[in-house]
Amino acid sequence: MAERKKIVFPFYNNYFTATSIIIYQANILKTLQYLPDEKKPTVVVWHNRQSPIHELQQTGYPYLQFVDTKQLGFRLKKASALTAIRLGIAGLFSFNKDIDIIYPADQDPFSSTIKRKIYWKADFQENYYPDNFLPEELKWVKAFFRYLGKHPVDTLVLSSRACIHDLRDFYPEIENPVELYRFVSHLPALNNSTFAGLKSKYGLHKSYYIVCNQFWPHKNHGVVVRAMKEIARHGPLPFQMVFTGKTSSKRGDAYFRKLMDDIRAAGLDKDIVITDFIERQDQLVLMKNSIAVVQPSLFEGWSTVIEDARAIERFVIASSLPVNQEQIQDNVWFFEAHSHTELATMLENMFSDPPTWIPYNYKLRIGHAVEDLVRIFDL
């Protein structure tokens, strides 16, 4: 049998920085599970002590290796500067000599000797909403594309055709090969018997909609609050709204405080339930039992929430972003992202007269994702 390919996964995010990227990488492992055993690559996970490596371990992928890169770096600090450089270069050549691919690659000294580097850009939000980003983040993006342009043989993976369009608009000088990988969701078997306990825990006493986004400015929770306020003008609300997601982040603290002020000022404290960050199993059970999943975002690269809703067979009410319309065509209603009145009408109509579910086979989506990874990684 041919030797397995070795792919490095840098896995340095945590729930504070980017939960969606953690889910993205775990879902890639679950997609690779669909390959015949002889085609499955070995995945070497570079991580630090804060990395939630249990998320990858729980996928059950059989060919995982874990390397704490902070420990490797610590050993080099004991030497003089010159010796450390020599040890580092020698160590990297030795350590990475069997690695075929790194994904997603970065300007990381540990990756300098890896044969093939494949980069990933989740989206181009910073070009539309630069105020949502720290100056150092914007500086990093510019450096990333300068670096990419100097290495035109390296591949860039994007998550949607909308992203490819943005790349051509904002970085026409980039000539690197571009691959499209529209990731899919792989959901665990749900223990729906926990739903009664979750209803009691979070004070759910009516039917409800659910929004599953971190509290970042581009996630646009405010339009949902204004829509609920609009409906409440005509009498008691017949349903509740659930917001899941971490309530503090490097981008969202001021945003969340204003959102809470708006909820209290509108008298919606009992009608809008904020769970904070919860276990994914609990989140999925709440999604499964909702009237529909609401995705009001002002910007996405490819929405994990919409993909989860498709996999779990829930209706979606989504902002009419081109990428959202690319991602889902059935079992969805679209509204203009800034129109709370349009959203309010949809919430009332879906509650009073639910649409007919259009069946589809999500396994076909997974099959396409498997084919994409085989092509991208040359498996």
Image (cartoon, rainbow, N blue to C red):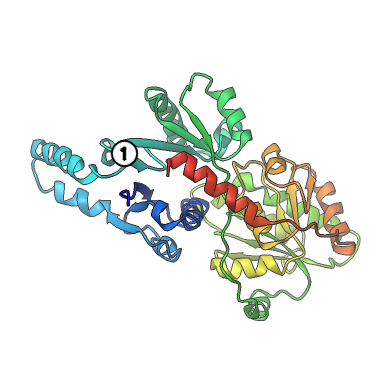
Looking at the picture, tell me which residue is in the foreground, 247 or 294. 294
Q: Which kind of residue does numbered mark 1 sit on? A: Asp
In the picture shown, does residue 225 fall above or below 301? below
Q: Which residue is mark 1?
A: 108
> Residue sitting at 61 percent across and 72 percent down?
190
Horizontal and vertical percent position of residue 51: 37, 57
* Identity of the residue drawn at 84% across and 68% down: 238
Residue at the (61%, 76%) spot, across then down: 191
Q: Position of residue 228 (x, y in %)?
A: 79, 57
Front residue (pair 186, 193): 186
The percent coordinates of residue 125 (x first, y second) are 58, 36
In the image, is residue 124 above or below residue 14? above
Report the residue that reaches farthest toward the top: 173
Left/right of residue 140 with respect to residue 312 in the rendered view: left
Q: Label 1: how many residues lie within 10 Å, few (<14), some (14-19) or many (20+)? A: few
Determine which quarter of the picture holds residue 80.
top left
Query: Where is residue 278 shown, x and y percent of the image?
Result: 55, 67
